[in-house]
Image (tube, helix red, strand yellow):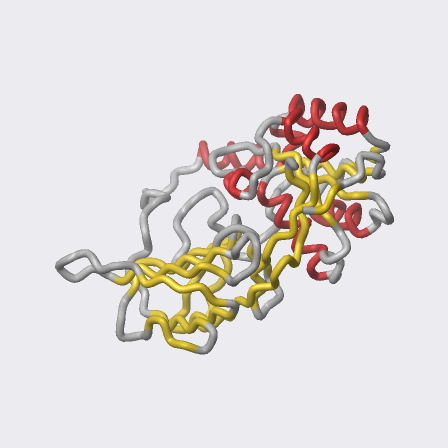
Amino acid sequence: MTEVATSDQLLVVIDPVARHGDGEAVRIAKDVLSAGAAAKVCLPDGPEEFDRALARRGSRRPVVIGDDRALLRAVSLLHRRRELAGCALSLVPVGVGDGALTLSRALGVPMGAVAAARAVLDGSERRLDLLVDDSDGVVLGALRIPPLGGSADSPEGDGPPHPPHWLRTCQSLVRTLAARPARAPASASPGPARLRVEVDGRTLVDLDQPVEAVSITPGRAGGGARIEIRPVSVGAEAAPLEAVARTITVSGADFRYRADAVVGGPVRTRTWTVREGAWGLTLPG
């Protein structure tokens, strides 16, 4: 762990969804941060302005006020700009809806505006592993194939992660008024898949063995990612296959995957590689 100086100048980037969804928590976090350090506050209206504010941070230490998607956007931008190595991110988690802060909680970020803001000021930088795929996408917390349903189950590239507040309101009204066909429960699984999973060049499961799920989780302190494969049970319940590896390749018929809060694909093959200690997050000491 690396100590973070409280005298650092901060760039506080407030995600628009957090601002519109829980303005009181945002105000509290901003007041605590501004009282404890020299803070420049940015209020981007959308993803492009969010990215621009981070890219122009200069020597200021970036603090994101927002949910898991806002954190993922910040890490993805810094990864694309090859600036993760020299930048420790801080997060004050403010989310709206179930599962909006699942990743933040799993990473050890305090829940609550005051506690999280104090951790930004008094905490320490912890270097964490990162999964990077062959299209330059990143995974911070967990990857699952096939993806389970949820509020974020829209493929990559189908629009910005956070539509403007007025657009979300209109969309909600349209959904309420319009007749819609019945949908399967959000938690329903798409069913078994036939996939080949290779770990560090070794085949862990092949196409002749259907699987219910594949999960991949980057480690916290190096040593590779944890892979768990649940084969389809025939009669007695099949034991999961487990491995730790630095390179994981999944191939087969077109498949989608959920990487943190984003659903990607369909693809026929994808390789994820562990980047040890690739990004830093400020956490309580």
Q: Nearer the viewer, residue 91 or 94?
A: 91
Name the residue: 76% across, 41% down: 4
Instruction: Give the image quarter of residue 213.
Output: bottom left
Instruction: Give the image quarter of residue 192.
Output: bottom left
Name the residue: 85% across, 38% down: 9
Q: Nearer the viewer, residue 132 or 171?
A: 132
Percent of width and height locating residue 57: 83, 47
Percent of width and height locating residue 5: 80, 39
Name the residue: 43% across, 37% down: 178
User: Does residue 208 appear to the left or right of 168 in the view shown?
Assistant: left
Counting labels gives 0
Percent of width and height locating residue 140: 56, 52
Name the residue: 36% across, 62% down: 242
Farthest residue, direction left: 235
- Image quadrant occupied by the C terminus: top right
Q: Is residue 38 above or below residue 236?
A: above
Farthest residue, direction bottom: 201
Q: Nearer the viewer, residue 272 or 5?
A: 5
Q: Nearer the viewer, residue 240 or 132?
A: 240
